[in-house]
Image: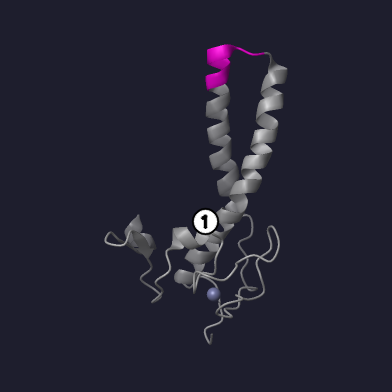
């Protein structure tokens, strides 16, 4: 699978794309919500909104459209984790159903909101490294 996405540099523990000569770790830049080119500028201007351009290297980011891809990944991963936790609580403690509602509904909401930005940022960084989108080449 890594050969389809690029290569992994075991010395530095960084994922290196084969299509761009960029030394930014995709996972680190994604989790920190940083620019895919320089790894220092902010990727977002609002909660889910990608900035017009990087404030450090001026890479144009506005053409990015991650669409619903990150949300699908987040919902599936968070949903699987919450269902596993809810099943464990049910089997271990057998609480009434209203307790499940009080515990898991806010947890699902908060976990999805917390994971959406990094998931979208990782997708933007991977798209930049693999030239999926038409990012500005001049900067
Ligand atoms: Zn930048």
> Does residue 71 appear in this view?
no
Q: Is residue 135 left or right of residue 16?
A: right
Image location of residue 47, percent across then percent down: 69, 58
In this view, 74 is above or below 1: above
> Does residue 133 appear in this view?
yes
Helix, strand or loop for disc 1? helix
In this view, 36 is above or below 136: above
Q: Is residue 32 left or right of residue 63?
A: left
Residue name at image x 72 percent, y 19 percent: 98
Residue stretch rendered in magenta on the structure: 88-95
Q: Is residue 136 left or right of residue 5?
A: right
- Magenta span includes 106: no
Q: Quadrant of residue 87?
A: top right
Image location of residue 102, percent across then percent down: 71, 25
Q: Quadrant of residue 79?
A: top right
Name the quarter where the N terminus is drawn: bottom left
Task: Read off the residue under disc 1.
Answer: 31
Image location of residue 15, percent across then percent down: 37, 62
Residue name at image x 63 percent, y 76 percent: 53
In this view, 9 is above or below 58: above
């Amino acid at each position: 699978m890594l050969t389809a996405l690029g290569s992994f540099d075991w010395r530095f523990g960084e994922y290196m794309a084969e299509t761009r000569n960029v030394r930014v770790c995709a996972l680190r830049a994604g989790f920190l919500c940083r620019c895919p080119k320089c790894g220092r500028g902010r990727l977002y201007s609002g909660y889910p909104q990608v900035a017009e351009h990087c404030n450090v290297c001026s890479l144009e980011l506005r053409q990015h459209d991650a669409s619903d891809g990150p949300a699908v990944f987040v919902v599936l991963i968070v949903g699987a984790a919450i269902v596993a936790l809810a099943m464990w609580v049910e089997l271990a403690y057998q609480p009434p159903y209203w307790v499940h509602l009080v515990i898991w509904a806010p947890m699902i909401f908060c976990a999805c909101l917390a994971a959406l930005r990094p998931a979208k940022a990782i997708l933007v960084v991977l798209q930049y490294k693999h030239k999926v989108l038409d990012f500005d080449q001049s900067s």
